[in-house]
Amino acid sequence: MATRTTKTNSLNHRVTAAGDARRQHQQPTKTSSRCVAEGETVTHDFEVARYSQLIKTLGVGQYVTSGTFSAGGHDWAIRLYPKQHGAGVDHRPPLFHAGACLQLCDAAAVAPELVTARFTLCLVRNDGRASPMATEAMTAAFGAPPRDRHGFHKLLPDAGKLRAWRCLHNDAVTVRCVVTVVRATHPVPPPELAGDLGRLLATGMGADVTLDVGGRAFPAHRVVLAARSPVFRAELFGGMMEKDARRIKIAGVRPEVFGLLLRFVYTESLPGDGEGCDAATMRRLLVAADLYGLDRLKRICEGKLHASIDERTVASMLALAERHNCPRLRDACLAFTSSSLAS
C-alpha cells in the first residue's frame, strides 16, 4: 500500500558550494517534497519555487537540497544545481547546464558497506508527465563521501525551454526521483557446521574414542561428546573414568537408539525430523536423552509423543513423563484423561 508524506521548508534552505563544507544562507527559497512509496520503489517529487530568483542567487556548483525521504531502509535527498560549468565555444563565456543528483544521507552509518540503487531524475511537466529531457535510469553504488551522491549534469534547459515544455509554472520547477534500492545479489550461504560434523561422524575421521553399545562400535570424538553432554564430559574428562580410555561400554540403551542420539549430538537433528521413528523408539530416545542430559532432544521427543497419546498409552505415557520430568507430556496426558472422563 502506498504511503504519502509531505514536508515544506520555507526559510534559509541550505545552499552550499560543491566541495565546500561551509553552509551559506541565501535568500529564502520555498521548496516542498512529496514522497510515494510502493514496495521497494519510492517516487519523490521535489518542488522548487522562485526558480528565476534561484538562478540569480546561486553561483556555479551551488545547490539547493530537498527534504530527506526513506527508501530501502536508508535516507536520501535530491540536490538541484541551477548552474554548472559547461564548455566554452569560440572564446564565448562557458555555457551553464542545470543538473541534479541523488544523495545518500546516512552514508556514514553504512560505511564501509555500499548501497546499490537504481534511479531516475527528471523534470515534471504541468500535466504530471516527464519532460522531453527525461534521463535514462542510472545504477550506482553509494558509499562514503564523495561517493554518497550520483546524478546527471544536463537535466534542466534554459528558462525558454522550461516554459515551452510546460515545466515552469508560477516560477516553480519540480524534479522527480524514482529510486529502487537493490538488495544484495550474493546472499550469505546457509550454516554448514551441522553438515560438516555429520560427515565427521559418518567417516570416523580423527575419532579418538569408541563407544560399545550392545556389541556395536560407534567411533566418536571426545571433545564433541564432552561439549554436548555433561554426562559424557564427566566420563571423558572428569573423575568418573581414566582420561586415556579408548573404549567405553554403554549400557541400558539399544544400538539403534544410541545411533539416533549420537547423530543428534553431532548435527542437532534427527533423520527426517524424526517422522520415521515409531512411538516406542521415541520413548526410548527420550529416556536416553534424559540419561545424557540432552535437554533439547528430550523436549523434541516429548513433543513427538503428544500425538501418540490414546486410551491404551495414556497411563504408561504419564508414568514416563513423571519419571523423566516431562511437564508438557504430563499435562497432555492429564488433559486427555480429563476429556475422556467428561465425554
Image (cartoon, rainbow, N blue to C red):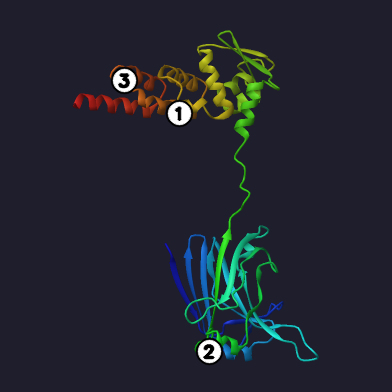
Q: Quadrant of the C terminus?
A: top left
Q: Disc 1 or 3, which lies upstream in sequence?
A: 1
Quadrant for residue 262, please give it. top right
User: Which residue is farthest top?
Assistant: 215
Q: Nearer the viewer, residue 136 or 144?
A: 136
Quadrant for residue 337, please give it. top left
For label 3, the crowd category at 10 Å Cα-Cα, with few meaning under 14, some 14 to 19 and many 20 or more, is: many
Instruction: Classify residue 23 as left or right of residue 230.
Output: right
For label 2, the crowd category at 10 Å Cα-Cα, with few meaning under 14, some 14 to 19 and many 20 or more, is: some
Please tell me which residue is depicted at 63% across the width and 23% down the height of the picture. 201
Question: What's the residue type where badge 3 is placed?
Answer: Val
Q: Disc count in the image?
A: 3
What is the x, y in percent for residue 289? 49, 22
Alpha carbon separation for disc pair 3 and 2: 84 Å
What is the x, y in percent for residue 189? 62, 42
Question: What's the residue type where badge 1 is placed?
Answer: Ile
Q: Secondary structure at mark 1?
A: helix
Residue tagged 1: 300
What is the x, y in percent for residue 103? 62, 70
Q: Nearer the viewer, mark 2 or mark 1?
A: 2
* The disc label shown at residue 171, or none: 2
Residue tagged 3: 314
Decide: is 323 above or below 160.
Answer: above
For label 1, the crowd category at 10 Å Cα-Cα, with few meaning under 14, some 14 to 19 and many 20 or more, is: some
Alpha carbon separation for disc pair 2 and 1: 71 Å
Please tell me which residue is depicted at 72% across the width and 77% down the height of the picture. 19
The answer to whether residue 294 is visible is no
Q: Secondary structure at mark 3?
A: helix
Q: Secondary structure at mark 2?
A: loop
Question: What's the residue type where badge 2 is placed?
Answer: Asp
